[in-house]
Image: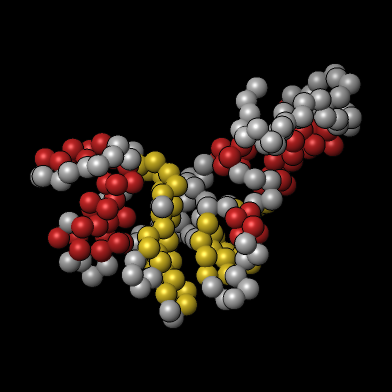
Amino acid sequence: AHNGNLINAALLRDEYEAHGSIFKSSSDTEIITHLLSKPTHASKPDPLAHVLNHLQGAYCLLFLFKDRIEAGRDPYGIRPLCIGRTEKDAYVAASESCALDAIGAEFIREVEPGEIVTIDKNGLSSRFFVEKGSIMPAHCLFEHIYFAKQSSFFFGENVHEFRKKLGRQLAIEHPVDADVVIPVPDSGTSAALGYSQQSKIRFDMGMIKSHYIGRTFI
């Protein structure tokens, strides 16, 4: 499973096709499996860590092996990835903490940038494929302002509270003379609430999103 985009995918694909690799899709995720199966990579003491150092871009990856699950996050921590634990003491991994809520799992922590977390019969263990803290984090801001669910927690902060802070700052930088603050649901609701609180302009709903017809656009 892969959440992200590899910016060197085309270069890697061309290189591997030139040496006889056959690709079945246009997905950049498939490239990772070719890297893992390359004999010179597979013979390394830690093949997965070696392969992840070949990737450039955003990636949170989950690998299912016969005896373990490995979860890895790119050195910049661009996309979120977290670890949880169920009531039966089983560890789980997900992009957003709201997914843990859906199965009644407890949020444990985020996978750190450049970290690989292993889940096996012995429990949870981790290692880093780059020196910890050697790269400045570069989080995807769109995760916080649009992609994520308001109840999620990542990048060290609750999404709802972060969006409210954005709304308050917007009110400071761009004040307006208005009668009401109306959000565009759902991602804009928290920010509009923050704008309303800072500006003292009344908050109200003027657009109602239908949750019964799938994804909607304005």
Point out residue 158 in the picture as x, y percentages from the top left corner. 68, 51
Point out residue 94 in the picture as x, y percentages from the top left corner. 52, 57
Q: Is residue 59 left or right of residue 31?
A: right
Q: Is residue 194 left or right of residue 12?
A: right
Residue 30 in sight:
yes
- Against 175, residue 196 (above or below) is below
Task: Please tell me in which quadrant of the rendered image residue 36 appears.
Answer: bottom left
Tally the numbered discs: 0
Point out residue 74 in the picture as x, y percentages from the top left corner. 41, 52
x 86%, y 24%: residue: 180
* The C terminus - image quarter: top right
Q: Is residue 92 left or right of residue 205?
A: left
Residue reaching furthest to the front: 212
Point out residue 63 in the picture as x, y percentages from the top left corner. 37, 60
x 21%, y 57%: residue: 37
x 62%, y 38%: residue: 145
Name the colour scheme. secondary structure
Residue reaching furthest to the bottom: 122
Is residue 82 or residue 89 the one in the foreground?
Answer: 89
x 17%, y 66%: residue: 43
- Against 28, residue 117 (above or below) is below
Is residue 112 or residue 212 the one in the foreground?
Answer: 212
Residue reaching furthest to the left: 19
- Against 46, residue 35 (above or below) is above
Is residue 182 or residue 136 the one in the foreground?
Answer: 182
Residue 172 in sight:
no
